[in-house]
Every structure is written in C-alpha cells, then in structure tokens.
Image (spheres, grey):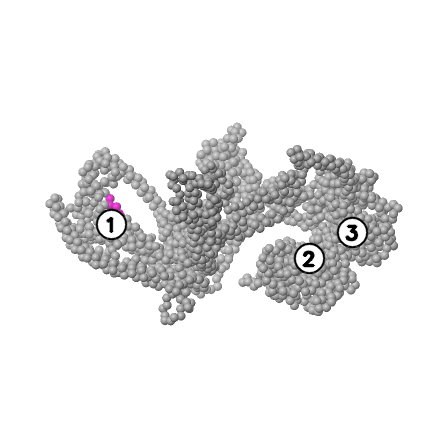
Amino acid sequence: MDSSQGDNVELMGDEEEDLGDDELGISFLQDIIELEHSFGYDCKRLFNLVMVDDDTLIFVSGNFLHYFSISRREVTFRETVFGCGIGFITKNERPEFVNLFTVGENGPRPTIFIYEYPSHDVRIKLTGAAKSCFTAGSYNASGELFASQAGYPDFIITIWRWERAEVVLRAKSFQSNILFVHFSEYNPILLCSSGLSHIKFWKMANTFTGLKLKGDLGRFGKTDFSDIHAMYMLPDENVISGCDWGNMLLWEAGLIKFEVCRKGRKPCHLKPITRITMKNGEVTTVGMDGYVRVWYWETVDLADPPEDDLFVEIDPIYEFKISDVEIRAMQKIKPFEEMDFGYYAQDGNGGIWFCDINTYDVPRPPRQLYSCVGGRVLAAQMSPVSPHMLALSESGKIFVYDFEAQRLLLEKQFPGNGVDILWMDTQISGLGTELVAGFEDGILRHLFLDLSNPAKASVHLVKAFKAHTAPITRLTINRSSTLLLSGSADKSMFIYALSNGSSELVQLRPLGFVEFKAVPNCFYWHHEEPSVVLIGCKSGEIYEYNIRTNVTEEETYLSYNITDPARLRSTRFVSVKSRIRRQLRRVQIKKRKEKKRERKMREIDKLKKANPGLQIDMESALADSEPDEEEEPLHIPTIPNRILWLRYTERNTIWASMAGYDAGYVYELEFDAPEPTTCTLITDADDIEIHSYYIVDEYILFGMMNGTLRINRLNAENFSDLADYRNYPMHDALEGIIPCIISSYDGQRLVSVGYDGNVFLYKWNGPKVVRNSLRKSLPAMPSIGSVADILDPETPSLEQEKINAELKRQQEAAEAHDRDVLAKIGALQSVYFEIVRRNDELPPGLRFPDKDLLLDPRITQQIRDELQAELDDVREDLAYDLEFAQVGHSKLYNHFLKRLDHVPFTITPLCANVEPVSTFRLETLGEEFQQIKRDIEERIKKEHDMRLTEVIAYEEKEDSITGPPPETFFFGRDPKSITPRFSRKMMRLLHRYRNRQLYEVRRIFDWDKLERQKPDPNRNHPDDDAKIAEAQKNLGDYKLKINADYEPKSTETLTAKYIEIVECRERYFDMLNEFNQRVIALRDQKKELMEFIQTRRERLERIHEYLPEVNRIQLKKTNEIDMEMEYPELNLIEHFTPGCGVNVDDILYLENTAEETIRLRNPQHTLDNVSLYEMAALDNPELQEVTKFKALQISKLSSTLPPAEMMEYIQSLPAASDLAYYELDEEGNSPMMQEMRHRWLRLLTVEQVHIIAQVDEQIRLFDLQMEKIHVDRFHTKLESEFLTSFMISLNQELYILRDSEEIESQLLQNAKHAMGTRNELQVVINTTNRQLEELRKNIEKINEQISGLQVTFSNTIKGHKFYDFLRRIFKKKWRPPKRVHGDDEESSSSSSSSSSSEDEGADAQSVDSLDMTTIRLDENTCPIGLDRVLYEWSFTMRSDRHALERTLLESHRDVERKRREIAEMQTKMKYHEEVYQREKNTLLEFRRNRQHEINKVQVNTILRMDQLQHFYEGHDYRDVSQAILFDADMLVDLRRRAEKLHEETLATRRWHRINFVHLRRMNRDIKFMRFEITRLEEEIKQAQMKRFGLIINLDELEEEVLRRYVFELESTAEEEMAALEKEVQERKIELSRCEEQLVQETQNNTEKLNIQTVLLEQKNVLDSLLDVQERNYAKWANPQVLNLSYDIEKLIGIENALLQQIECLEREICTLRLKAKPLQINELLPSQPQAVINELTPMEPETELCPAILNVEAYMLPPMPDDFIMDRVHTIVQKSFNQFFGRHTTAENVRKFAQRSSLYLCQAAYSFQGKYTDRIAECITEHLETIVPKKYFIHISAEELRKLFNEVVAVFDYERSDVNTEELISGIFEHAKDSLCARGICEIVNRTQFIVMHMFKELAEVLPLEEFQSEETLRIIVDVLEREPMADPRAINVEELVSSTLKHAQENLLDNITAMPLRQVGNNIQKALLKRRQYKSPNCQSPLSVRIASKKPTANTGLPF
C-alpha cells in the first residue's frame, strides 16, 4: 500500500544520477495508517463484475480487488501488485478454466495477471502489451486466445496465446479509448473492438509475409457518431452493435446496413446497450435503462428497407424490467446450463442485483444483493458523538454507515444532485445528529438524522432554504459554530446565523448575501476572528471578508444584499510555475556544467601527473564547448485555474493549492503582493492537483488527483517543509480524485472518499485528536410537525421572494392609480359621445366630418401603431406558411414548368366537327445540352488523337536544284564589286553565260526527275492497286454486325453514340417544336379571327338595328375561346401581394372594408388590353347612320323589297327632274325619300350578306387548317414515338459503350503504343535505307572520280620514258595501318606513304621500260631526266587517289554497318509488328464482344409490304425473324456503280485507242527529232571549224574571255601589292596557328609517351608476375604446406608500428581536445627506421607465393568517386541521354544506359585528369559503344560528347572546392585593407600584422582546415601580399597571429581550429614572402627571434605518421 519514493534528480549531461528511496529519511513508519474496510464499488466502470465461483463475485474498487460473498453479504479486499490502478477484470468462460480470472493492472509496466482461485497464485503473467494502461480484455470462444486492449498513449490491441504467454498478433486500434473487445463465436479469425465514437472490425489473415491482423474502421455514414459499449458478431460476419440512443445498428462490410428500432420509431432502449447475445435465432439486449429485451432476429434478416430510410421497426418478443437500475454488466450464474436463467447484474446506480431472464416460465423477481454509492462521492462526514459516518453521492443520495459494524444503515434520495454536506458539531447542536446539505438546484436543507433505533434509521427534513439561483458550490461553518456560509455559482455567498434557543434543534436565520466577481469554490475561517472568512474562487481570485452579524430585519426588508466593499480584501493568483521550472532547469544545467568542469579538472590533473612538462591552457581546456540550451517560453494559462483549497499560515499569509497547470505546488500569497511570495514543491507530484487536506496534530494528509493519499509530517521550524512524506495509492489513478478526508470522533479512524465511488475506512496509528466522547444512545427526532420540502427547482430564492414582494406592492399601487385614471376617462368619454350624437342630428351639410372630431392626433397615431403591430404579428405568424408555400410553388414550378418550352394548350375548332388540337409537352434543350455538345467536341478531338494509323508516312526527300558551277573567272572575289564596271557587251556575255548555265542545270534536273517518275511497265500504279483491293474487299460485300468476322469500325465509339443521341434529341426537339410553332401560330390566327368576327358581329348588330326584323340574318354560332384550355399560362400569373395589398391607412377611418379594398385593387385580366371607349368625332359614320335612320323613317318599313320588285318600284316613281319627285304626300313621304329609304336598306342588306359570307369563309378556312393540322399531329405523334423508342435503344447502346469505355481505352492505348513503336522503328529503317542509297550513290561517284584520275594520269604519261616508274608511283596502294600485337608494338606503324606496294615481289623486279638494266629506281629520289613537276604531280595524283580510296573504304564500311543496322531493326520490326497485331486483335475481339452485346438491343422499325423481298418459294411471309434489314439507297448505289463501271470500261477502251495512235505519232516524232539533233550537231561542228578552225566548248571559251577581261580589269600594281600583302598576313596567321598546333601536338605526344612509359612499366611488372606464376605453376597445381612465417613476422611488425601510431594519435587527440600544446613525444621515443615494403618486387623463385597476393588488378583500378558525385554525374548523363535518344527508346533503357555510362565516365574523368583530346575521345567513344547500342549512339555527335565529358569533369572540379579560392582571398584582402583604412593610420602601427591577422580570421571561418593548409591557398595568399607594397614579412608575429586567430575561433565556436596548422601556415607565408622579397638578414635580432633561438632545436616535432 506504500509507494513512497525519494527525490529523482535528472542530469542532462554525460552521466545521470538516480537517487532511490531512502527509508532512513522518513521519520514515521509505513503502517501509520492501515486500510480497515471499503464501503465503495466502482459501479460506473463497464463490465466490473466477475463470478469466480457460486458464492463469490469479484469487482474492482480503487487499487483493490473486492470479493463479495453472496451468502454472507460480506466484502473482503485484496491489494493489487503495482498499486497503480486496474484496467479491466475478466475471466475465461471455458469449463476447463473456470477457476481462473484475469486482471489487467496499470502502471509504468502494465501487466496482465491470470490468477488461480481461491489460492490467488499467478498462473500466467503477460507483459509488454501496453505502455501505461489497459482498457479492455476478452477471450475467444475456444478459450485459447486472449485479446488485450491498451489505452493512452499507444492504443495497441494484442492477441495472445495466453497459455504460452506469447504474442500472436498486435496492431494499433484507434486514437481514443476502446471500451470493448469481442471475438466471433463462429469464426475464430474474426474479432471487433469498439469504444468512443468508433467500431473496428479485425481479421487475422495469412499473407505472403505471414499472419497479419487487418482492421477496417466502421463508417457511420449518415448516422450520427456514437459510443459503442456492446456488440455481437453474427455467423454471416455481420455485426450487431448498440449506440448512444439505444437502437441496434447492423453492420455489413464496415457500413451500417440498417438501424433497428421499435415500432413507431421508438428506441430499443432508452439508454445505451451494454450486452448483446444471440441464441436460437433470438437476440437478447441489455440496456442501461434497466430493461432486458429479446428480439426475433429472422424478422430483421428478411427486412428490406428503402435506401433513403434504413430503419427496421420490430417489437421485442420478451421484455424484462430489472427495477430502476443502470445495468453495466451481467454475469450468468451457471454459464454451462442452458435451462438456468439466473444472472448477477452490475447496477451503475450503486449495487449488485440478482435477476431471472426466464423465457420459458414465470421469472423470479429481481432482488438487490449489495448496495453502495453509485457514481462519484462528493462529500463525507463522521459523527462527532458516535461511530457513524455518511457519504453524499453526486446523484443526491445520502448513505449512512456504522463503521464499527461495517454495515450500511440508511439510504436517502433527494430530488436534486448533491454538492456538499456538513455534520453540525456538538458546540451548536446538542443532539449531535443534525446535518446541513447543499444541492445543485440551489436548495439548502437542514436535516435530522434519527439513529435512536439503528435498525430503523431515518432522515427527517427540518427546514429547506432556497437562497441561490445557481448550484451551491461549498458549505462551511465557522469555528464558533455561529455562522453558516453557502457559496454558489451565482457568484455570491449567503450567510446564515446559527442559534439553539428554546428549541432543541439548531435555528438557521438568513442574514443576507455578499456578491463577488467570481464563483466561490472553497472557504477557510480565521483562527482568531470568528467572522472573518477566506474565500477561494474558481477563476483564481482570493477574497477575505469580515462578516457583519448584527444585521436587522429592516436592513433586509427589500433585499438580502449586505455586501460592504469596506469589509472586503482581495488578491488574484498569478501563475509563476513556468518561471519556477525555468529556474530549476537553470540550476540543473549549472550543476551539470560544474560536474563536467570537475571531471575535466580530474582529467587534467591526471594528465599532468603522467606528463610533468606538459603546458595546458586552463582557460581553453576548461571552456565549455556545449552550446547554451534554448529555454522554453513562459506559459501563462489563458483561463485562470481554480483554487482547490486555502488556509492561513503561521506568518499570517495564505497557503493555496491550485488546479490545472499550476498544480504540483502549494503557493504562499499575501494580499499586498502581486504574485506568490513562496512556492513549496510537492515532490513526486508535479502537475498533480491536491484536492483536499486534513491536519492531524503534526501530520497533514493530502488527497491527490491520482487517488493517492499523501501523508506529510510537518516541520515544527518550517511549516512549508513537506519533504518528510509517504504515498499510499488507494483510489483509482485515473478517476479517483479524493475530495474529502475526515476523522472519527475519537481520532482513531480516517475516511477518504473518491470520485471513483469508493469510501475507504482507515485505522490511524498516529497521534489522536479526540473531538468528543462517545454517546451510548442517540436522541430521536423531536416533534416539529410536518415540514414542506422544496421540490420544484424553479422555486424563487429568498432574494427573489423579496423582489417579488416589492414588485407585487408596486403593481397593486399602479393598479389603484389605473382605476382612478379609467374613471376619469369614462366621464370624458360620455361627454364625447354626447357631442357625436348631437353632430349626427345636424343636417348633412352642417355636420363635421369624423376626422374633425378627433381630439388628439396622437390617439390616431396610437391606433395606427396598434393596428400596424397586429398586422405585423399576423404577417409574422403567417411567415412560415408563406415561405412554405413559396418553396412548394418553386419546387412545383421547377419540376413541372421551368424546363418546358411552353405550357401545353389545346385549340378547339370554331364550327366544324373536328377534334381539338393540342401541342406536345416539350422540354427545352437548355444550356446543359449545349455544354454536352461542347464536351462531345472535346471528346472528338481526343479520340482523333487516339485512333490507330495503319499507314506509315514515308518521308519523301524533296528534290532540289543544285546551283550552277562556281564562276572561277572572278578569282574568288565578290562579283557584285566587279560587274558594275563591266561594259554592255561583256554584261550581255555574262548574262548569256549565266542563263546557259542555269538552263543546263535545270535541264539535267528535269531529265533526272523525269527518269525517276518513269513508271514501271511491269507494275500497276499503286493507287490503282489500292482501289482494286478496296473494291475486292468491300464492293458489294456488306458486313453484317451479327457475323463472327465483323470488324467494328474505329468510329463506333462512345462519343459517336453520344453524337447520335444528341442529333436524335435535336431532331426530336425540332420536329415537335416545329409542330408546336404551327399550333401557336394557329392559336394567334384564331385570336385575330375571333377579334375580326367580334367586330363583324358588332357591325351586324348595328345593321340589324336599322333593318326590319324580317330581313335580319344572324351569324353562325361559333365556339368561344376557352381560356383554360387555350391560354393556360394565364393561370400561372401570380396576383397576390403581401398582406393582400391592404395597409393600415386604408382601413383606419372605416371608409371601406378590407374586402372592398381588396376587390378594388384586384386587377382584371383580359386577353389583351383593348380600350372599351373611343372618342367620337363629329364625322362619325354611326351618327350619320342614326341620322339617316331617323330622317328617312326607316322604322315605317316592315321589310325590304326584293331586287326585282324594288327595280319596278323605283321605275314607277317620278323622275328626278319632275317636281312630283320631291312633293310630300299625306303621310309626309316623298318619292325621293322612299327611293332613298329603299336604296339605303338595300345597301345595308347587301352589307349584311357580305359580312356573313366573309365570316363564314374565314371560319371554313380555319376549320380546314384545323383538320389538316390534326392529321399532321397524328403523323408527328407517330414519328415522335418512334424517335423516343429509338432514343431508348440508343441509350441502351450508350450504357453498353460507357461500361466498356475504360477497358477499350486501355486496349486502344496499348495498341497505339505498340503501333507507335512499330512506326518509329519503320521510320528509322526508312531513314537508314535512304542513307544507304545515298552512300551507294557516293560510292559510284567516288569510283567515277578514281576512274577519271586513272584516265587522266594514263593520258598524261602515255609514251613517257619513265612510264613504268611513274605508273609504279601512281599505282602504289594505300593500306590502313595494322595493329601489331607483340613486344615490338611500339615500332610497328604504317602510313599511306610507307605502305607496301600492290605486289612486293613484282615491284622488286620492276625496271624501267626503256632501261634494260636491272636497276630499280628509288621512289624517294627524282631520277635524272625526269621533269620535277611531273614527278611531284605523280605523287599529288597518287595522294588524291589514296584520299578517294580511303573515302571509298569508309563508305563501304558505312554501307556494311547500315546493312547490319537494317537487319537488326528488321528483326525488331518483326517483333513489334507481332506485338502490334496481337494488341490489335485483342482490341478487335473486345469490340466484337461489345458489338455482340449491342446487337442484343431491340430496335423498332416500320416496313411496308413493297419493302419486303423474298428469295425462296412460298406464300408465308409473316415470319421475318431471319430477314435482313437493308438500306434501299445502298442497292441504288450498287446499281449506279455497275453502270458507272461499264461507262468507265468504254471510256478506258476509247482512251486506249487514242493513246495507241498517240504513241505511234510520238515514236515517229522521236525519230525525226533524233535526226534533227544529229543534223544540227553536224552543222554546229562545221560552223566552229569554219569560224575557229577546231571544235571548241562555248562555255570554256566564254569563261576564258571573261577571265581575261576580269584580270585586265582588276590587275593594277597597287592592287596586286595590297593583295600580296594581305595574303602574306594570312599566311603568317596560318603559320602561327600551325606552330600552336605543333606545340599542342608535341604536348599530346609527350603525354602519350608518359602514358606509354607507365604502361610499359606495368607491362614489365605483369611480365615478371607472369614469369613467377609460370615458374610456380607446378607448385600451385600440387599445393604444399605454406611457410608463412616471414609474412607473419612482417605483419606483426606492421601491427606494432600501427599500434604506436594509434597511441601517438590518441595522445594528440587528447591534447587537442584540451587545447594544450602538442606533446614532444618524439624526444621520448627512440627513432625507428621505417620499413620499406615493396609489394610489386618479385620474390625469389624458391619462395612460395599465394595467388591472391599477385592479384595486381586491384592496384591498377582507378579510385572511385563517392555516392554524391555518382548521383550528380548520373543525373547529368541521364538528362543528356534523354535529350539525345529519349525519343527512340524507353525511359528504362535510358536509365540503364545512363547508369553504366556514368560509372565509366567517372573512371575516365579520374584517369584522364579532366583532359579531353582526340585520342581520348576515340577511346571514350569505343567504350560507350559497348554500353549504348549503336542505333542510339549515332544520335550523339562528337561536340555533344565533348560537352558531356566537360560537364562530368566540372562535377569533380566543383567537388574539389565549392568556391573560387583566389577570388575569395582577394576579396578578404581588400576587406582587410578597408578595415585598416577605417581604423585610421595612426591607430594601427603594424599594418602587415593587422592585414594578415584579419585574413586569418576570415579564412578560418570560410575555408575548411584542409583547404586552408593547402599549397594552392598558401601560394594565393603570398601572391596577394606580394602585390601590396606596404606588406613587410618581417613584421609578421606568428605567435600573436596564432593566439588571435584561436581566440576568434573560440568566440565563434570554431572547435576544429587548432594552433599547429595555424602556426605552420603563418611560418610558410613568412618564409615565402621573405624568399620573394630577398631581404637582407637583420643586424640585430628581434625579441621573437631570440626567444625562438633559445629553444632546444628538435629534428622532428610532429608525430610519426
């Protein structure tokens, strides 16, 4: 139980010291406290119940295992091994392991113990499965495997074969806690884990690397994330799991298949499910709501919910209620008996229950076996007079125990959650059993505990107070028991006065409350002043308040607020922990450095003792080279931490314990100090909060956050000294915060409670503090009557009651005032109504309007505001409905109307019996359709690039006309500068010459081109062959798509199908749109017609007013326009406005009602806006007609006369010239009036007939159009239906193509890649063939040139007396130099001039043809009598012939090489062609299969009988299933093609006859032209003979004339001299270039001689080695025992020498590390001659040699570069190769070639030292050709190869030095001079010393030490200093220079700079400068030289390396 530890001191240096526990340092024994009993149970922990036998249950509580005896109802406990908490407890359910249980203990080394019961022996111990803690563990169904789950920080799941304690598998589970692990009962390789917001499914799978544990995380999808506490894996690998809201989730393949709930969407359980089992198809679930339900799972398996609502509703078949419990675990009593249904259940509310889950019989009622605190224990108190204690849980339940009898007496549940409780002391409560409890609802309850009869203990409510509006945080009573304080989250502290007057019970009188700026969290009373209290708050504030107790009722009449700022003192805690940590860290670093310094001092002392004369720079040796550590930034919490407790100290300061970041210290604060004055470190408790403390005499007990009870012994001299302590781990380390520690009345026992639900009782063996004596009997509850408790949490507080009472009083006064005001208003209202009545009695003209009777406009405004407010309320109430309707309207419009082209409508006929015509419902194509078309265009471009190109493009070489031969007669000068001076005659000659030259060149070119274009008479034209093959293959042979050999076209792609669908959709839209437009136009026409009919009808009605009734004719009845059918879009116009368009002002004065206002504002919609009234003009025809009607008295006629009668009647009237015509009769009628009357009526009658006829004709035409468009609609409907069907078929084909597109694209890509490879290779072959053809042409030309040379030579020397001699010179053959392999290789060389002749024997016997002697003439000497010019000309001709022969030989070699390349490429071409055909056939087969699937798509078509043709006998034509649907256009094309072929045949025959006749005519013309050419040539010859006397060439003649003319034109003396001088200058330049070339060649020859010398030396060595090997071959063939004694002795000597060197190097390293002077070791050691070992010298013959020793290849290999250089060279080479031939091969080949070539180029760069000559280029080229194939290497030119090699060499040069050392040193020197100038001339005396010192400091920083010491750097420094006149080497002080540079290096942390190299460099610079300046030796010696000379000279001052 004790785990006390000492201080751990960590030193971050080379050594660390760990101080262990020092038991002698602790002043009290470990058994000062002993655990006596445990009353708790961590029942909130999941699965914390294990049954080990029939009478024993084990559960975990704190750091103890509790054993509950079911029969005795007793609890015993056992401490854990480590005392750091328990992660889980479980057992193996197999019968053979029934006596075992498993415990997973947490701690620094978490371990799983498998115990035997009841012996508690450890059977197996499993370690290494977690870093800190465990969370779960489980066995599989067979009991062989065990799974353990680790918690933070590793979260590792481990599968054990536990009997052998070996790990099978392990993996990372999740990043949060895992609560449950479950193995499948049906598949042993499956398991799953779950926890916080996750579930994971595991599978143990065999892979090629072994057994693996694979996990898949479950995805919740649309379901909310949930914590999963239980799950069960079904036989089909599906998993059932619970969730937070109580439903079951069915998982399939890592996804939620559906969610199971009860019917009506009720959850399966009201709380999470903690257990799921399955048996016989029934699933049993156990929930935290106390229910156990059984479900018939087959109903769930057969369910098929919709995808958008994945819920399955099912009711349980059985249901069991286990009281009001929270079931967190269940343990079957008899797990191996199927008919036993008894279980033990873990109640999360506190306890263990027995329950019976019997589905066959009536179950037994559940009963509680054990009861305890459920959840966190917040407070506890012990009786001051009796052995009783009580505990308050967070749920508000009080538990009363008799701790001596160790039993529970009483449980009492209160309505609110508990916070704090106090047991009043006997100082105020004489009864000793009164309590005060505070709750979260802000209620304070005064309780009485009746323990007079322990068997019937009870708790009675004395009084309840509601003083706070927020939860109570803490209660406290002062030391004199006169005041009770309650702190609350409402930032107040309420004060009660305690008194025990006449009543036996304590009286609580509310005094008032004090307000703070923070929430009180803890209290502490002053030791001396009983009314002064210290308050600690949750945000770090500390208040001290002096409570005023003499508060009267008058002061609290209106409010209980008695806050007095004058009585308040405050301060606030400031975090200083980060500063403390920084200071501690500094102290640690300082201690570590001091120890390091002490260790160095010991080493120096030891070194001085070993070397007495050693000089050591102590400052440098003891200097700390370790850089200063970077300190962490100070951290101040953004949210202040709360104060857990505080108290006064002896120094009148405040001790405070903080939470959060500031935990781990006890801080001492003062009110006047801005921050803590003293901080006491709690050892071993950094970052651990101290939640409670209790002082017992000289001991203080701390309750820690990690569940540890810490006992400290106070130091009497220093109360802050807490170093004397012990730790007792009791409660759970993770959840076991100890909020309270108390002692019993006699001080012999202590109690600690924790948030883990545990209540531990201890026996205190230290000093006792007795509070009271024991009372043998306790009083009963006094009689006080019934007391009402406060049950409603919304009950007003005491302050609110005061406020409510005051508000009620104010309200009553206001109501009385209102009643008085209303009475006065009533009287005034009566007067007003009387005025209104009198106004109404006045006549209307004298009445005042209602607006004038308004008394005050404010009344109207108030009414307006009220109405407006009511209207706004109505609109606000209807806002949701309005928005709902708008959203619904928008959705309906978008779904039904938005995409329509127009609203469908129907047109009815006017009169005819025709069916109405409706438009088609048509959707617009829209922007999406246009986007689809644009996408299709993009796809077409991509597919065009992806098509296979069968034809390989042959690169035709364009023929070009060569220019005319050069004009030699201009003597190499620019013709443009000479021709301006030509005469006209010579210009004509020049133009004629040039035109003839161009004509000849053009003629030759045309003849060559014509010859090439001449067709082969034995072959057809390629175009004809292609057309014939195409016709034979396709003409008349139509491939059926159902045939097996059908080749789908490459154009039959997904894009083509898209195009087809788009075109079909457009055709469908255009067709229906065209018809709809016609119907719309018809509707517009009907509208115009109806308007016309209406005007005609109105006119007819006007006519009928004038005509008699008998003569009136009515129009036909026509159908009116049905607005609903013909104009349905008018119904879609919205007419509403917000508020129906009614405002408050419209109804304010009651002039119109709201309905009338709405009706007036509603617009009247008509077909169109037509004005109903027109302005009548004075000349209105209607007025004239009315006037005529009245004037002529038409009404007197009953009818009009017929036309014949009317004519007779008019003729019977008098003539117009007769006066009787105008006379009136008796009735007042005259003949004129009668005639006018009849004529006018006749006009009206005719107009009536015309109107009727016109209207009838228009109606007939319209109805005729209706009939026609009705028929068209039928056909359009038919075509549209077939188009729709066709689009369905197209879409089916589209789906097939879309599904196969990806595969086809891949196959097409493969075929295209193979085709591209083949085409590229074919292009290379074609190019090579062209090159081969050009080479052949060049060979022919060279042969012609050689023949020409031979003919010219023969013609020249023919008949010469030295003919044979000259012929022998000319005929001597050129032979290539041969490579001779032998000892005389260096002397074997040949050239063209020294080669042997064609036949050595014949040449030896050849003599001069005219000299009969046998003397053979020497070729090297010109014979006497032979012209010297002819002699030299023979050699020139021979040289020309040799050059041509060499060129010819090279051309033949190129031809052979090209042939070999073509053969190789043809072999590859064959392979690539096979690959291409294979990929092509695969693609074709795939397309055929796809076409087979497409053929299954049904297509509808309509055929007429005349479209059917039968090819067999019979009359049954109904079966057309085997018919072929053939396009008629194809048949027509075939017939037309046959006719066309016949016509072409006849035309061809006609052309043949014509061409035959033309051929005969051409042959005759050719004969005539040949004759004419011969005749003309003869005439030309005769003319030349007649003119010139010989046959001449006109070109040569003209050239000679022009040459002479140009020469005469340009030949002046001055010009000739200038030309000669210019030529001389050019020759000099050429001579200097040749001399430079000679020098370069000489150097190259010297290098080659050096290389040859080295090779000869190597050859001699190899020859000697070969001789030795040959001599010793017999011995090697018969090996004998080797005598290796000599070799061993030699190796021993080498080893001794190396050991001495190692010892010297170690000494020097030690010296350099201490920064001391070098040891003069050579003076102590005797000089030893260095052994010279020559490994290459051959040994004596009789000595045997090992063959491995003679492996000289290792010595000859060049040094290899490092990996960094190789990588850079490889990058450069690969980049170049990609550029050269990356297009001709794959990237993998390029990488391989580059890798090999990089290795060789690196070796070449090392071997040739970066030089690049022609010979080296040939060598590199030959080797690279062995690495890179020739077909790729030909793409690299010589210049590119030189550039590549230079780049490789540049890499090595770059690696030698990253900077230009010369530029760097020059810059540093200039900077040093600038610094010297800035310092001033007078300030610096020794300028040379200053400059050199400045240069040394900067060079030490910039250059590496090796480069700083190099000779090149030394030379550059000396050169720079030499160029400076003021630099005097005699002024350089080397020692001062070294010391200054070393100091600078130490200041800049340059540890690699030492004194020896600096001194050496300084001396060398001084010597070199003295040598160059040649100073005389000084007369007097400087002090420095004297001091140097005084030293003892030593021969060797360095170490023997």
The residue to which callout 2 is attached is: 270
Q: Which callout, 2 or 3, points to the residue nearer the camera?
A: 2
The magenta stretch is 961-966
Q: Residue at x 21, y 41 (%)?
A: 991
Position of the N terminus by quadrant: bottom right
Upstream in sequence: badge 1 or badge 2: 2
Q: CA distance from mark 3 to mark 1?
A: 122 Å
Q: Picture coordinates of residue 914 (x, y %)?
A: 46, 56
Q: Picture coordinates of residue 259 (x, y %)?
A: 62, 59
When the figure is inspected, residue 616 is found, relative to residue 357, above or below; the finding is above
Residue nearer the viewer, 452 or 20:
452
When the figure is inspected, residue 1698 is found, relative to residue 510, above or below; the finding is below
When the figure is inspected, residue 960 is found, relative to residue 811, above or below; the finding is below
* In-image side of 1096 versus 1009 (left or right): right
Q: Residues within 10 Å of mark 2 (few under 14, many from 20)?
A: some
* In-image side of 1972 versus 611 (left or right): left
Q: Main secondary structure of the magenta part?
A: loop
Residue 9 visible from this viewpoint:
yes
Identity of the residue furthest to the right in this view:
502
The residue to which callout 1 is attached is: 1005
Q: Three-letter amino acid code at disc 2?
A: Leu
Upstream in sequence: badge 2 or badge 3: 2
The residue to which callout 3 is attached is: 380
Q: Secondary structure at mark 2?
A: loop
